[in-house]
Image (cartoon, rainbow, N blue to C red):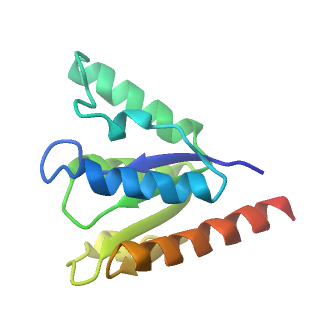
Amino acid sequence: MVKKVYLSVPLIANRDVRTAKRIARIIEAAGHKIISPWVLERNPNGNLTAAEVFERDTNGVRECDVIVAEASTPSHGIGIEMMLAHTLGKRIICIYRSGTKLSRMIQGMPNAVLIEYTGVSDLRKKLSTELKVLKDRLQS
């Protein structure tokens, strides 16, 4: 069953569109649908007001089945989205580069799956495996 995935990545500081697109390809190759395609755009917020960005992003988290959050660099937005997902009982997969000092709040988040990766191929292997487990678990 195709799951709706909210991809959460930094949109302001430390923005890395190339990594976001790589993560999106891994998610899509696993048979899931990205419901936050704006994170892959050069200008993700376009002409939206701050209030409109808040509504778009929080509605996306509400609509998703699972959130995949790239937490290698600190981001207020990612933290807010992860906490909202947690509060709503959503599945949370948090990915981060090896050597990252990950927030203790994220490390201690109940039911969040934490995936530490060393590079693109390692991320592809680990995230694909977790997404397959998720897909299989939800089909049973």
The number of callouts visible is 0
**What residue is shown at x 42% (from left), y 66% (from top)?**
94
Nearest the viewer among 22 and 37 is: 22
Nearest the viewer among 137 and 118 is: 118
Q: Is residue 86 above or below residue 11?
A: below
**What residue is shown at x 34% (from left), y 52% (from top)?**
20
Nearest the viewer among 135 and 101 is: 135
Image side of residue 93 versus residue 104, left or right = right
**What residue is shown at x 19% (from left), y 61% (from top)?**
74
Q: Position of residue 51 (x, y in %)?
A: 27, 21
Q: Position of residue 130 (x, y in %)?
A: 59, 72
The image quadrant that residue 46 belongs to is: top left
Q: Is residue 86 visible?
A: no
Q: Residue furthest right?
A: 140
Image side of residue 50 versus residue 96, left or right = left
The C terminus - image quarter: bottom right
Q: Position of residue 9 (x, y in %)?
A: 31, 51
Image side of residue 61 versus residue 99, left or right = right
Q: Position of residue 120 (x, y in %)?
A: 37, 72
